[in-house]
Amino acid sequence: MENTDEYYEEIQKDLEAGIQAAIIQIRDKKALEHCRSLSRLDPQKVAKILHLASIGVSQTSMVKKHNLNRSTILSVLTDYADYLGQFKQLGGKLAAKSYLNLESLEEDIVDALRRRVDAGYVPEFRDLKEISIAKSNSQRQAMTTRGEASQITEERKVYTQEDYEDTLKAAKDRLKKIKEAEVQDV
């Protein structure tokens, strides 16, 4: 168990170091551009947002549970879009640990409840409700960080009228060359 904890502590340290390195890089870039940026003004807040995003906490939860402004969250996530995949990979491992710990705790609670029931206790819904909610949230976070299908977004290429006209012209040119080649063959 200790090796497992050391493994996750190392992942946590790698995640924190990666976030700090990215903040420094973005902060320096924004300084060169003479741009006001949260990375320059409050790097700890940026680190908190990136850490929460990396472990699969939703933007809504960041707003409601962590009292962060939605536009601030979106701004940070946009600034650090190139880094989020790397952060989420590490965060997914941390979220998985949280989920497994809660699953183990749930088993312990169920066993304890089972012993109480065997001794004559009549269980109530609340006996398992809170741990089930925590486990469900933890599982959702772990799945989100690992790229659960519900989190995959479709990317569509937008074509302009100019793109359409260029493609049409290229097709007409190819058809013309084919017809000319057929005439020469005859």
Image (tube, grey):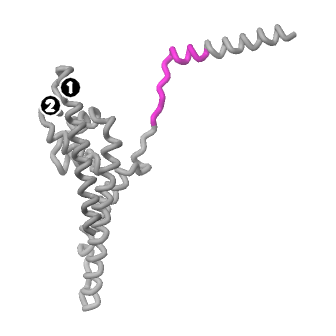
Query: Is 160 covered by the magenta stretch?
Result: yes
Horizontal side of residue 145 vs 23, given as left or right: right
Q: Characterize the local packing of mark 1: few (<14), some (14-19) or many (20 or more) Cα atoms within 10 angstroms.
A: some
Question: What is the tally of numbered marks visible in this picture?
Answer: 2
The residue at the point 19 percent across, 30 percent down is 27
**Of the image marks 2 and 1, the number of the one nearer the N terminus:** 1
**Res 103 quadrant in image:** bottom left
Q: Quadrant of the N terminus?
A: bottom left
Query: Is 34 covered by the magenta stretch?
Result: no
Identity, as a three-letter code, of the amino acid under mark 1: Lys
Identity, as a three-letter code, of the amino acid under mark 2: Arg
The furthest residue to the bottom: 119
The residue at the point 23 percent across, 32 percent down is 25
14 relative to 162, above or below: below
Specify the label residue 30 is tagged with: 1
Q: Quadrant of the C terminus?
A: top right
Write the start and end of the magenta stretch as one range: 155-168
Q: Characterize the local packing of mark 2: few (<14), some (14-19) or many (20 or more) Cα atoms within 10 angstroms.
A: some
Specify the label residue 95 is tagged with: none
The furthest residue to the right: 186
Badges 2 and 1: C-beta atoms under 8 Å apart?
A: yes
Q: Where residue 116 appears, x then y in whole percent?
A: 24, 86
Cα distance, mark 2 to mark 1? 8 Å
* SS label for mark 2: helix
According to the picture, the residue beneath numbered tag 2 turns out to be: 40
Q: Where residue 3 appears, x then y in whole percent?
A: 28, 65
